């Protein structure tokens, strides 16, 4: 995420410490405080707002969903997939998949997880009228509504898609596809609040929650359905306390003093720990930051490629990197980082920074800039750059949940949206942010660009049955997006997940899984 100023609300740490934020870049040694006693204290940058995994849209909601709900498949430690609730799986065709459901998994109320229970949960996701759930459904199953056929006697589940979608297996690793147990489906309101004791299929249950401040998860005594990880060592914590980071400097002080055990950094504070043997760390590309330009009906950038190009000419990604990420981000030249399979180097398709040229189009324009709250330094840079090109800029910064809702469903409120695409999302999902049906028509196209060729290329990639063809079509879709300037690539941030001595965490194929946090001594 992006460097931000301290939140208005001061949040207490899991250890109850109140430390002042201070600088410093020298390697640190942890104090003896917070010795492992079966508890891991960790942080997220934003508080979870809901606990129905099918509705999760903000990163915090997805992160904690991984603690409470198991998925059919999991990311492999280096690549590919491993079993979650499914012990094996196969593609019968490019629209039909079968899964053998393990027979030793249970819900938090003791109910055995059968294929019928899995089918009911996935149907809940696939047929939900909630806009976030609909977005998640498309990312997991593609367009249309899939069907689920359970055979409890044989222990199998058959998933039939409405049309070919080559990324369905990756979709079924996503936390938003987490399996909700029958007790949760019977009480949707309680499920969203996290108050249904029997809703959980994963290793942990939510036992305390203070909105905007903290959440406590407790390991189930009866849970024994861990994935077959080979690189994860240590003991799962009996208790996980999750608090909200007030700012990166304070998080660094808490980690150094033992107030927290595992946390993430995206700025220069990471360097306070990476040079010390007293800490372990893993890294991952986390988010691809882009500007979405509103091309919906009546939108400022509809049918005006010159104006869209001017935005790219006005914004220097290196300036954004310096302001938002202490210069630690890496270049982004397409919709996703180069670490994602089938992405292109789009640098030759992007205009050079040219403020004078941008002024010819932007002077006198009033731009409504939408961004998530607490991205302060980066937002300030973007607004200043657009103003330097002659535009009047009005900034709106709602919280994470409202930002997602407004960006996806209320295009009449903004002209440019600062978007952060999670790198672990399928490439097709990212491309669909800029092509195809809009959200109100069941798609993911936030900007409303009318890019018929790009959408055809995307659909072809999703029908492909071999990786070479799939990549060629994905690459073609990206080229149309960049050539049309339907979005402006900015930067990719690198996250450091740092654990103090006695604790560890793991990244799987570029994805941090909170349920992999362990006590090692």
Image (cartoon, rainbow, N blue to C red):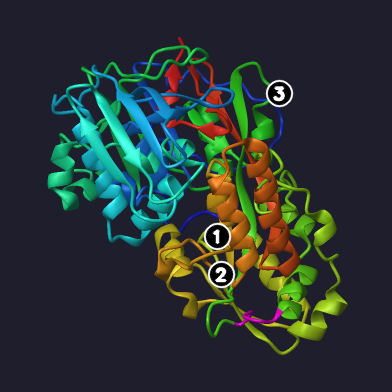
Q: Is mark 1 on a helix, strand or loop?
A: loop
Give whichever of 316, 237 is nearer the camera.
316
Give the quarter of the image for residue 359.
bottom right
Residue 433 is marked as 1
Figure disc tally: 3
Q: Residues within 10 Å of mark 1 (few under 14, many from 20)?
A: many
Q: Would you say 46 lies left or right of 256 here?
A: left
Tell me which numbered mark, 1 or 2, is placed earlier along the sequence.
Answer: 1
Q: Give the range drawn in magenta.
A: 300-304
Q: Can residue 213 be seen in this view?
A: yes
Q: Would you say 108 lies left or right of 373 here?
A: left
Q: Determine the main secondary structure of the stretch shown in magenta.
A: loop
Q: Is mark 2 on a helix, strand or loop?
A: loop
Q: Would you say 462 lies left or right of 181 here?
A: right
Residue 447 is marked as 2
Contact (Cβ within 8 Å) of mark 1 with mark 2: yes
For discs 2 and 3, the disc positioned in front in the rendered view? 2
Tell me which numbered mark, 2 or 3, is placed earlier along the sequence.
Answer: 3
- Residue that label 3 marks: 275
């Amino acid at each position: 995420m992006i460097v931000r100023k301290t939140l208005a609300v001061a949040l207490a740490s899991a250890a109850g410490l109140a430390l002042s934020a201070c600088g410093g870049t020298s390697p640190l040694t942890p104090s003896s405080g917070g010795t492992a006693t079966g508890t891991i204290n960790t942080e997220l940058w934003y508080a979870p707002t809901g606990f129905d995994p099918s509705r999760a849209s903000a990163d915090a909601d997805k992160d904690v969903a991984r603690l409470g709900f198991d998925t059919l498949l999991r990311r492999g430690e280096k690549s590919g997939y491993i079993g979650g609730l499914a012990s094996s799986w196969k593609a019968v065709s490019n629209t039909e998949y079968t899964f053998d459901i393990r027979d030793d998994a249970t819900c938090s109320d003791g109910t055995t997880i059968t294929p019928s229970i899995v089918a009911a949960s996935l149907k809940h996701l696939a047929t939900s009228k909630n806009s976030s759930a609909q977005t998640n459904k498309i990312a997991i199953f593609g367009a249309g509504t899939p069907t689920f056929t359970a055979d409890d006697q044989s222990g199998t589940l058959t998933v039939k898609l409405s049309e070919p979608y080559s990324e369905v297996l990756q979709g079924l690793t996503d936390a938003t596809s987490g399996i909700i147990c029958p007790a949760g489906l019977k009480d949707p309101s309680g499920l969203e609040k996290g108050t249904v004791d029997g809703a959980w299929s994963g290793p942990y249950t939510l036992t305390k929650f203070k909105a905007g401040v903290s959440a406590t998860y407790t390991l189930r005594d009866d849970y024994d359905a861990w994935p077959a990880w080979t690189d994860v060592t240590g003991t799962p914590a009996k208790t996980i306390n999750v608090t909200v980071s007030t700012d990166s400097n304070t998080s660094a002080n808490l980690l150094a003093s033992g107030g927290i055990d595992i946390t993430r950094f995206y700025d220069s504070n990471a360097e306070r720990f990476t040079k010390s043997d007293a800490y372990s760390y893993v890294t991952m590309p986390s988010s691809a930051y882009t500007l979405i330009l509103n091309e919906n009906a009546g939108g400022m950038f509809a049918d005006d490629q010159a104006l869209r190009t001017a935005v790219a000419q006005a914004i220097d990604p290196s300036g954004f990197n310096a302001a938002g990420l202490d210069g630690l981000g890496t270049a982004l030249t397409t919709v996703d980082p180069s670490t994602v399979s089938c992405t292109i180097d789009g640098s030759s398709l992007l205009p050079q920074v040219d403020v004078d040229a941008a002024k010819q189009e932007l002077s006198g324009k009033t731009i409504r800039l939408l961004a998530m709250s607490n991205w302060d330094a980066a937002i300030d840079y973007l607004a200043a750059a657009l103003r330097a090109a002659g535009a009047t800029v009005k900034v709106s910064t709602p919280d994470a949940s409202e930002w997602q809702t407004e960006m996806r469903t209320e295009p009449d409120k903004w002209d440019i949206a600062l978007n952060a695409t999670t790198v672990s999302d399928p490439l097709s999902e990212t491309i669909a942010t800029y092509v195809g049906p809009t959200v109100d028509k069941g798609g993911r196209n936030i900007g409303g660009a009318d890019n018929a060729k790009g959408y055809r290329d995307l659909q072809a990639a999703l029908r492909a049955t071999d990786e070479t063809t799939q990549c060629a079509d994905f690459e073609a879709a990206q080229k149309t997006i960049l050539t049309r300037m339907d979005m402006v690539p900015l930067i990719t941030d690198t996250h450091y997940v740092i654990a103090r001595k006695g604790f560890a965490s793991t990244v799987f194929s570029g994805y941090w899984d909170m349920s992999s946090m362990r006590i090692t001594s």
